[in-house]
Amino acid sequence: MAFVALPPELRNLCRRLTTTKVEQLPALLPSLLKDLLRCQEPLSKPQEAKASESSSESAILVHKLKTQISALLNSRTVQGRFVGVTLVKAAIETGGWECLRTSESWVRGLLSALQRKDPAVIKDLCVVTVVKIYSLMHAYPTLVREIVTPNLPTFASACLQILKPPASSKAAKAPNGLIETIFEAFSTIIPLYPTTLRQFASKIRAETRLYIAPTISDGGIIPASLQASSRRLAVRLHMTAVKGGDSTEWAKHLDGLIKTFHSTADQVFRAVQESWESAPGHVSDPTTHRVDFDKEPQGGNSSPEQLPSWTGIYAGSERMIGLLNFIGDYIRCRTKTAVTIPISAVVDITTRISSIMPPIPGKEKTSSVHMNTAVGREERDELWAVFPDVQLAAMRLLFTMTQRLGRNFVPIAQESLEQLLRMFESSYRLPDIRMITYLLATEILQLCRPTMAKPTVEGLTLVIKTCCRDLLGSAGHLKRPKQSASTTQDGLKSKSISQNADAFLNNKAEDEFMTVSLDADHVSSATALLATLFSHVPQQYLPSSIRSHMLRTAILSQNRDAQVASVLHPARDRSGRIPQVILPYLTQQFPRDESVEILRFNFRPATTGPRNYIMDVDEELREDEPEAKPSSNGFSFDRPFESSFTNPPDFPTVPTRTTELPADPSSAPKIENTVKAPNPFLSKPFSETIVRSEEQTTTVVQPINSLKRKNEDAEIAVLKRVEIDTTTSSIAVPAPSAINTRSQAPTTSGVGGDQEDDEESDNESVHLNMELDSDEEEEDNDDDDDGVKED
């Protein structure tokens, strides 16, 4: 379907650019861009190089629009150049190849504006527009040869001049926003045109060294986004190497970063007597990295190939954190060719950090590291103050490796989990530490799966408790800590400490819980970890108290994934039972969830009882049961399962012998059954038969087996109750005992009217509670008082 060849916006756009003053155009820029974006059809249509009288009106207007944009781009006023750069970018994105092939004059105008002393916003927009043009032209070799190759060196020189103005010029330093834009521009075009930019690689690397790992010794504040963009640019500079040498250049720079980190750690960790031994064989050079205890920790130099100098524990920790993030960017960023990642060297860094255990209050001193007596107490306190930030950076490096390597991380997953747990134990009070621990533990557990050993699972106890605490706190179910009535110090009551008198008042029940404010990412990571603990950790290794706490947290925080995982991966006790089934809570909280509905209709907790029982058998699945005897007493969650164990099931039995019952009920022998094992696939011990008529409703409950066992201590009577709802009176009448229908033996049971004879009888007596109509009372009573005998 073809659109209108000449949209009205094109004519309106040309008219407004002609009649409006240049100083007033910035205010009209939003509407101008809207009209320009709606002119895609005429701008992308092939046009002649020069418009003539025979050209169509659309071609004439397009040529006029391009001429007006070029005039604004080369305008003498700042407002005109700003509007011209903006319209160029919009026209390139709208017109496509037709605008690209005629954009050489625009590119030269943009480079000219970039070298002017214009405001930073115009230069920023010029850089973005030029990079956009170069990126779109990469798919067209002819345009690359005609436009990009001649003008790209000019663009690189103009950007470097902005980053480092010549000493003769009095230009001020570029703002951080413009520097970040230039770094992102180089990161975008270096993979596209590495050969053309090879001559500028050393100068670009020298400009990034100030922003890769800044410290407080630099005397300035560098935004985190600028640090990240400079590190990405430094990583991609290896692509400018000669053909075949980019992978070697990548490995060389990464190895240099690892050595720089260890030399910095030698200075920062000098207050600790480390027990760490480098696996790759790293040994500090005593001539260049000698630790001088008479001076403050220091490192770095002014060489263009090295990072700037730093002094002090705080500056050294910032340099270590920056280097760890830089190593993570080397692993995260993609390369054009295959590279070899030095996994052992990277893991050696995290091993060194995790081997240092800060002193924890309440624990023995033997569990922490030994301190160097040559270092003062102030430096040790500074080290423990900045050490959690170093641990956080190490955890993020491990998390980057798990995401980058995927299944290839499995060989070092167990070791990394142990390092994570050691670092978490000393710094879990910090929310950032807990969040990255949840993320990293989730990734590692999904890799290890059920291959984890029992000691490793038990080591996750602290992580599980903090995860549950964060989820309960975010859901508002965390108990508020109670303030003691008296505060003591060293066993004595303190009189100088002021207390909150309102804390001792009897608060309401809802005031006993508090809500903890956490980031959405923090709660999301804890939620994912809780579900992973149910689905990927061997449940038989989890203590029952910990799993109960996890189930309670999943229910209170309404964590659907965790609850579903707990049902699908139940925990069994020593007898083979499943003591905790939370499927009713799950269906109540998520009644319309598809996954819960599928689980509810398909899942049957087959081992909720003893080993030989299968619970919750669906009545519809019993195809071998006759349709004439429907049963509504199937096993379900809403019925106590004691009835299925205490009462014998309803299934036919074959007796070993058939004895003919005499007329005297007192002398009747007892019949034993050979089959007494309960069958869980059959119905409940009592079956209900409902007979409906127009006038009355009768419910008859019949015994399942009239033959009773031998019992030396007591005799158990099985009662049969008949209830008729439409009558008003009730009487108790003895009834004949049931006969084993399977044996077909002609037996007779005598029933007398005397109450004493019934009590002495060994046969089962059945009381009938009947409510009869007033018209049928006498007739029914006469029938029930007669004894029935069969010869």
Image (cartoon, rainbow, N blue to C red):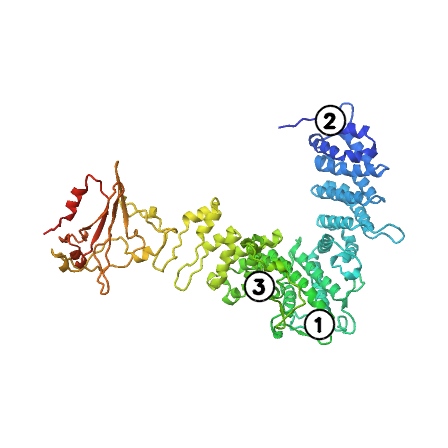
Marks 3, 2: nearer the viewer: 3
The image quadrant of residue 44 is top right
Disc 3 and disc 2 in contact, CB within 8 angstroms: no
Give whichever of 357, 767 is nearer the camera.
Answer: 767
In the displayed structure, does residue 66 sit left or right of residue 417?
A: right
Considering the numbered disc 1 on the image, is that residue within a helix, a strand or a loop?
helix
Disc 1 and disc 3 in contact, CB within 8 angstroms: no
Give whichever of 589, 168 is nearer the camera.
Answer: 589
Q: Position of residue 640 (x, y in %)?
A: 36, 54
Kindly identify which residue carries mark 2: 58
Give whichever of 705, 5 is nearer the camera.
Answer: 705
Considering the numbered disc 3 on the image, is that residue within a helix, a strand or a loop?
helix
Q: Position of residue 363 (x, y in %)?
A: 60, 71
Pointer 1: residues within 10 angstroms few (<14), some, or many (20+)? Answer: many
The image quadrant of residue 477 is bottom right
**Mark 3 belongs to which amino acid?**
Leu
Give whichever of 401, 685 is nearer the camera.
Answer: 685
Disc 1 and disc 2 in contact, CB within 8 angstroms: no
Tell me, for residue 417, which label it has, or none: 3
| Sequence-first disc among 1 and 3 | 1
**Mark 2 belongs to which amino acid?**
Ser
Tell me, for residue 778, which label it has, or none: none
Residue furthest out toward the bottom: 373
In the displayed structure, does residue 605 sit left or right of residue 353?
A: left
Kindly identify which residue carries mark 1: 271
Q: Is residue 535 visible?
A: no
* Inter-mark Cα distance, 3 to 2: 67 Å
| Sequence-first disc among 3 and 2 | 2
Q: Residue at x 47, y 55 (%)?
A: 566
| On-image quarter of the N terminus | top right
696 above or below 759? above
